[in-house]
Each structure stands twice: as structure tokens, then as C-alpha cells.
Image: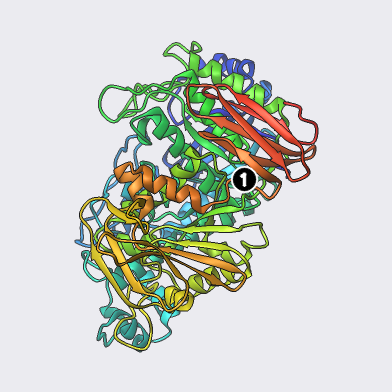
Amino acid sequence: MEVQDVYFGALYYRPPFPDRTCWERDFLNMKQLGFHVVKLWAVWNDIEREPDHFVFDDLDRLTELAGKNGLKVIINTIPEGAPYWLYEAYPDCLYETVEGKKITMGGPANLPTGGWPGLCMDNPEVSDLVCNFIFRTAEHYRDNSSVIILDVWNEPHLEPMFDYKNELLCACGASKRAFRDWLKVRYGSLERLNEAWFRRYSDWEEIVPPPRFGTYTDMMDWRRFWLYNLAEWLKRRVEAARRGAPGKLIQTHSASADYMGASSNGALGIELSDEFLLAREVDVFGLSSFPKWLMGETKRDYDLSHLLQSEIICAASREKVFYQAELQGGAGVPGFLAHKVPKREDIRIWNWNTIAAGGKGVVYWQYAPEPAGMESPGFGLTGFNGENTERSLEAGRCAKLFEAYELDRSRPVPAINGIYLSRNADLLLFAAGAQEEKYAHSIYGVFKSCTEGGIPVRFVHGDYMESAWEEGLRVLYVPMSLSLSDEEQSRILEFAGMGGRVVLEAAAGLYSEMGEISAGGSSSPCPMLEAAFGAEEISLDAGDGEIPVLDKVGAVLCEGLYYRQTMKAARGKVTGWFEDGTPAMAEVEYGKGVIRWTGTFPGAAVKDAGSRAAAEFIQKQFKAEGYSLFSVLEAPELIVRLLQTENGPVMAVVNQTPESRPLFTRERTGKEWSLEVPGYDGVLLILETGEQP
């Protein structure tokens, strides 16, 4: 089955809301707004009310109304709303913390029928029942032409972690067994595990999940296990849906870009979802975003964070279709009263962010205000009586606008500038007492610097570094990557050898992927620095506040945070110094390329200290033109991205500021383009003709 051209619409139904009396009125209004799709929740305890007895009456009526109004349907299966007969049958299969506390089933903020968080799928009997529910739902809609997508996991993560962020889990009996089995495959023998973990286990059964933060190696492995384990859970769900409905597209959507987390404080190690693993398993991938509620206190911050997360999801999706599967449609609810209601310009910018990042549409959370529970009275695009608001009208305008642009077959053109993402770098900081927000903030600071400078950039994950040069990457910035595997370091060095520019922040690769420093032996504590610079006498000292880096005459070149790393380099040249005169920056030719090093963390200084010196330093590391097509690009405070379409390359330009801003670019062929981009808006330009579609 081919992918739908575009996905613009809203989540409408999670049982039992909205009431049946509203359905016909609301579906007609969706059609008039210009929506193309509607998403419906299929909640397990609402459908399989007794074992092996399935009731689809409400969903059948809703899909019928969708067809009548020309809307396609996305059905989102929700096993996390588990039937209570499941708990009665399998009480020993509950999620469990390392301290032995079982997570009993109840009603969360977003699930009126309760049953959350369900039971742990490491228990085979639970896994079979979850997959059977998905299979039966898919089978029921196999021949329904209105249903185009089955979303088999709503925001995959270790389900209790949204409400139990201070706990370490799951440590139920089945998860412990699965962890040990994974370790057996990873290490092959208990002797090798003992060597890696510095332990003296005499039997595999002695191994349990880490009960607290302390040693890095076991904690990193436990969280790494869960990332791959959840990808395996997703694979099972996908297989069940494919068996039930072979012709349907299969989807999942992430609660955030997990290397950032919904609030840009990191989520990989605690929520245990990794978009770079999950996107591999599905046909279509999506993102949930609640920018005004979660992503920042100012419009500039939450707009920028939304774009950043969209572009990480684009990088994870690779060649697959992705779109905004959930976007804040109304007020967010951190307490009893809803607040932070989006304005029309918010809806507009978030749509432009999605399109510029290569997304194929926006589905809002949600169409109508929630009438009960902690999410009431929030999130609705429309008013309490179904009336349109400035938000719903702008959502409809954007749907019609981007359908007219005919970007359904477009794909992002990779920028020549890249920001490196590493699973190991994140997990080390999580293992160090749940400090992964420092890694997320470093990534944010680099991205923000590029955006303020009008420099096109993309994200490059370690899993795909091998093909980065062929995909057009020429500059790679590596923020706060204290832990890197041998393979990651080799790939980065190979990229430089091919002719790339690599920019390393302090202590890149200081720790192995196991959270160990190679010190006191024959290996350097920073293998990449040794390979590039012949580095020796490496040290790492904590800093106090902003850490300046100076040029020869004492002017500030850059600022960083947290640490200052020093080294004695046998090759290359020193280009910056700390205040005490020790080297703080160096550059060396490596193969056909160049490697630059700075002994502190400029990305963090941008995010956490607002450092202009750090932002300007970061901007200078990248190629300002951003794409091989351009020789010149001048676009300060603008987001510029290229999309390849059937009509040739299209330049998407987004202005997240209130003032109109100019853009100038010259192609390598000599063609020049000048644009004025209105405030809180965007522009598309077909570069073959100079037309704005």
C-alpha cells in the first residue's frame, strides 16, 4: 500500500470521549477545515472486555463516518490500557522497581478507561496477549479502505517511566531473566562479563539490575539492554499487525526526540526509547510535540526546540516517511487549570518547522477539549461546543496550504554540516547519576548557535556514520561525547581522513562504551586525540562558571562550561589557550581533512550560560553556505532547508522571529536569490524557476 500523500488532521477518539452526539458534526467540520486524516484510539480494555471477546462497535461507526466525509483513518492500538482480567490472571507480571515495588494498574492522565501501565511484555504470556489484541484489531480492519495506518505503539518507552522518573525499573522476574540472556549473547561467557564489569560473579543467576547509581559499566549495560529490548517489543507488535492486515502501513511515534526529551533534558536513559532503533521497524514514523507546554518558557525557545526535535526524528527516519503524529492543539495542563494556549502564529510556525524538516503533515492532539481527568479541559483545537477557534482555523489553513505545495514526494536534501549524536555518550551521563540533561543541553546549544547564524545543519547518528561522507557530510561537530565506542572513534577519524572537518569538544572518547577510562597502560585516555594529535599528558579539571579560551593577545575566542581539558600535542598547532597559558584549542591536518579540538564545552555554555562567545565560535566551525548547491548563503536568524521534489530543489525558509528578515543566496551556477521572509511565517522557493508555489 502506498503512503498517503499528506497527513493533516487530529486525534479524535479515545474511549469514551467524545460523546456519540458530536461525531457527525465534528467529522463534517474536519472535512470543511481541509483535514485529510483522523486518528482513533483502540484501547485494549475497551475492546477485549472479556477474554477473546472483541467489541469494535464505536470504531466501526467512526471509520464509517470518516469514509463518508473523505477522511482516512489512523488506528492507534493501546495495549497500555490493559483489561483488568489480565491483572487477575497474571498478578506476577506487573512492572517492578529494583526495590521490589510493583506498579499496579490504574488510571493515568491520558487514559480514561485505566488499566495503565499494563503488564511487562518480558513475560511471554503477556506478550502473546498484547500481540493477539493488535493482531485481532488489524485483522478486523484488514479490508476497510478508510483505515490506512495501524500505529502499534503510542509513544514507545518503558511505560511507567513517565510517572516514575525517580525509580529504576523494570526488575520483574521476567525482565531479570531477559537481561541475563542479553548479557550472555553480548559477552559470551561469565569470565568476559566479569572482566568488563570488574566483578567476580560465579553464576549468571547472581546478576541483577543495578539497584542504585554507582558503577557505570553495569548501569550502561542495563539501560542499553532496555533500548534494544523495547525495539524487540516493537518488532513483535509490528509482526502481529502485519499478520492481521498485510496491506496496511505500520507506524509508531516517539514521545520526543529521545536524545533531547520532551523538555530538552534528555530521555534516552530514563524513558528507554531510542528513535534510531525504533524507526527501523516500521513503515512510517512520527513524533509527539507539546511545544508551548513542555519545550520552553519563551516562544523563541519552544519554536526552536520543536524544530530541533523534528530534525532528529527526520535523521532517525532515514528514507522513511515521518510526520508530526501528535502536536499540541490546545492548552497544556501541568496542574488543575489549563494554560499556555497556542496562538495562530504558534500553529503556523510548528507546521512550517515540520515541513522544513521533511515531515509529511501534522496530526493534532487533539480535536476536542478533553472532558475528564488530568488533561481536562486542555488540548482541544476547537471550543467546548465544537466551535472553531483561531487554532483550528489556522490548522485548516495550513493543511490546505501545504497540500497545494505538493510536497508529498519531496525528501530532505542532506546539509553538509552535521551535529553528532551518540548513544554511548548519552548513556554514560545517565549512568553518572542521571545527568543526561548535560548532553541534551550541549546538543541544543550547538543547534541554537547554527540557527541564530542562519547556518543549515542536520543530525548524524553514530549508527549511520559509515555512510555520512557519501551522503554529503563535510563538517561534523561532536558535542560532549565523553563515551564513544572504538567503532565510533574509527568512523569519525575515517571521515576526517576522507576530507571532512571534525570539531571535537573536550574529552571526546575519554571513556570507552563500557564507561571505562583507558589510563595507566599502553592506551591513551583519549584514543582519537592520540591518533590525531599524538596527544599525551592529558588532564581534566573542573571549572567554576564560564571557562574562557583566549587567543595570543588575550582576547576571548570562546567560552565553555563544566571542565577544562588540557593536553600536550606532538602534532598540529595550538590555536587557543586557557587563562593560565595551557593549550585549550588545537588543529591538525588528518589525511585529506582536519580535526579541531577545544578543551571545554561550548555547546553547554550557549544553552546554560547564554554565552555569545561560545555561539560565535560554534558558528565559525561550520560552512555558512550549508549545502553543496550554494556558494553563498546569508540568512541570519532564518532556518533554511532544501527539499528535493519532482520539480527540482525547493528552498524552505522559516522565520521564527516576529520581524520580517532578508535572505540572500548564490548558487554555484551563479544564480542569485533574494527573499524577504515575513515574521512568524515561512516561504518556499522553487530554485529551478524562482517561483514560490
| Count of numbered circles on the image | 1
Q: Position of residue 438 (x, y in %)?
A: 32, 53
Q: Residues within 10 Å of mark 1 (few under 14, many from 20)?
A: many
Whether residue 647 is visible = yes
Q: Is residue 520 left or right of residue 368?
A: left
Determine which residue is flagged by label 1.
625
Is 428 located above or below residue 555 in the figure?
below
Q: Position of residue 95 (x, y in %)?
A: 30, 56
Is 3 located above or below residue 486 in the figure?
above
Quadrant hosting residue 222: bottom left
**Furthest-front residue in view?**
553
Q: Residue at x 40, y 70 (%)?
A: 509
Q: Position of residue 304 (x, y in %)?
A: 45, 36
Quadrant hosting residue 407: top right
Q: Residue at x 50, y 21 (%)?
A: 659
Q: Residue at x 43, y 64 (%)?
A: 597
Quadrant hosting residue 552: bottom left
Quadrant in which the C terminus appears: top right
Closer to the camera in the image, 339 or 559: 559
Three-letter amino acid code of the residue under disc 1: Glu
Quadrant in which the N terminus appears: top right
Q: Position of residue 401 (x, y in %)?
A: 66, 23
Q: Residue at x 41, y 25 (%)?
A: 379
